[in-house]
Amino acid sequence: MRIAWLSDIHLNFVHHHRIETFSREVAESSAEAVLISGDISEAPYLKEHLNIMANIIRFPIFFVLGNHDFYRSSIDRTLYLAGEISSNSGNLVWLTGEMVVRLTNRTVLIGHESWNDGRIGDYKNSPYTPADYFMIEDFMGLKKDEKLKLMQSLADRAADHFKINLPKACQEAENVILLTHVPPFREACWYNGKISDDDHQPYFASKIVGDTIREIMHEFPAHNLTVYCGHTHGGGKAQVLHNVKVYTAEAEYEKPSIQRIEGIK
């Protein structure tokens, strides 16, 4: 089976014609399924843009959301929307609403958005202010410590999801693919060809998710986990454990692209 991995395609920045052209590029590739690791669009346009892709691509599209997908709305409303889109489609599958998806006899798929949790780097002194604070309703008007608590509660929710589903996935197959938006390890937070500094790490990484992955995969040394993530727009690969490798997407606004087409066993 061959999968096409997309990430941070930000379709709200491109015209409908380009969305259709890009979707045809994916449909005409050698892929038999698509993985999208978030930042597909923005909440008001998410349904429309995903449906355009689904109508052209036809084969399964597995996706999680990214922080930009919550822009101009709230977290709960956007999560509900993602579930609704998935339920009403024949080929769009929101992985956060699923448990373990079998791709082949030897490979299964799990996924969740995750969230940067401020537990790596220097959150307190970082001068960086992400657009999330102004574009997602839940963050508006919060003090810095309150924003941190919200970020961490969202990241903890993702970790809880993986605590349940990653062991199940390992019990079902020797190879597991984990799709998420936020890099779960410091060494996977690539930007401009190097690892992000302590000012950006609080907003680029989800430590609790990474800790959860490490703990579980230590218990399954004969299994292999491949993580696909995005968020930083800086591409790179990290071998975190002997059985855990992480691909981080390189992306550019207004230029949606296929990150890679991968054959899986």
Image (tube, grey):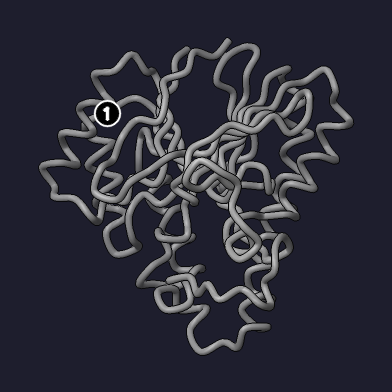
Specify few, some or many for label 1: CA neighbours under 10 Å numbering under 14, 14-19, or 20 or more.
many
Q: Position of residue 165 (x, y in %)?
A: 72, 39
Q: Position of residue 115 (x, y in %)?
A: 60, 59
Specify the farthest residue to the left.
17
The count of marks equals: 1
Q: Position of residue 259 (x, y in %)?
A: 40, 30
> Which residue shows up at 64% across the image and 39% down it?
99
Quarter of the picture containing the C terminus is top right
Vertical comparison of 35 with 88: above or below: above
Vertical comparison of 186 with 148: above or below: above
Q: Position of residue 114 (x, y in %)?
A: 61, 53
Give 12 or 63, whichever is nearer the viewer: 12
Q: Secondary structure at mark 1?
A: helix
Vertical comparison of 127 with 209: above or below: below
> Which residue shows up at 58% across the image and 31% down it?
237
Q: Amino acid at mark 1?
A: Ile
> Which residue shows up at 62% across the image and 42% down it?
188
Q: Quadrant of residue 7?
A: top left
Q: Is residue 162 left or right of residue 7?
A: right
Give 152 or 195, whichever is nearer the viewer: 195
Q: Quadrant of residue 19?
A: top left
> Which residue shows up at 63% across the image and 69% down it?
151
Vertical comparison of 220 with 106: above or below: below
Q: Quadrant of residue 202?
A: bottom right
Q: Is residue 21 left or right of residue 148?
A: left
Specify the farthest residue to the right.
219
- Residue annotated with mark 1: 57
